[in-house]
Amino acid sequence: MANPHVDHDLCIGCGLCAEICPDVFYMNDDNLADVVDGADCDAAGCCQEAADSCPVDAISL
Ligand code: F3S
């Protein structure tokens, strides 16, 4: 299903996605969100909420 992606040109590093959905999103060394290797949105069940919560719509699913 959904293959989450973070647009680093848009991400402002607010950290909400990693807070809402830590099984899928984490903050990298540049303080931008990245997707955990092998992340499973179906299992995590929080990708949509994370994407909807991103203030700059940097997350696509
Ligand atoms: Fe970045 Fe949006 Fe997450 S700004 S840290 S992708 S909630």
Image (spheres, rainbow, N blue to C red):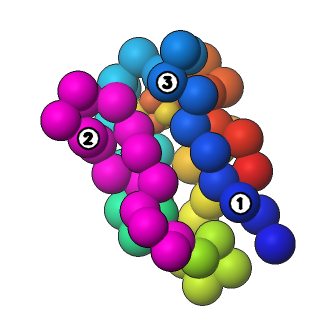
Which mark is drawn over residue 3?
1
Alpha carbon of mark 3 to alpha carbon of mark 1: how far?
16 Å
The stretch of residues the image draws in magenta is: 25-39
33 left or right of 9 in image: left
> Label 2: which residue?
28
Residue appearing at x 59%, y 65% in the figure: 46
- Percent coordinates x, y for residue 37 in the rendering: 44, 67
From the top left corner, tell me how far across and down residue 26 is, in percent.
33, 51
The residue carrying mark 3 is 8
Of the residues shown, which amino acid type is indicated by label 3? Answer: His
Residue located at (66% from left, 26% from top): 57
Amino acid type assigned to the residue bearing label 1 in the image: Asn
Q: Height in image: 11 above or below 29?
A: above
Q: Amino acid at mark 2?
A: Asn
Residues at circles 3 and 1 in contact by the CB criterion of under 8 Å? no
Left or right of 51? Residue 28 is left
Residue at image position (56%, 37%) is: 6
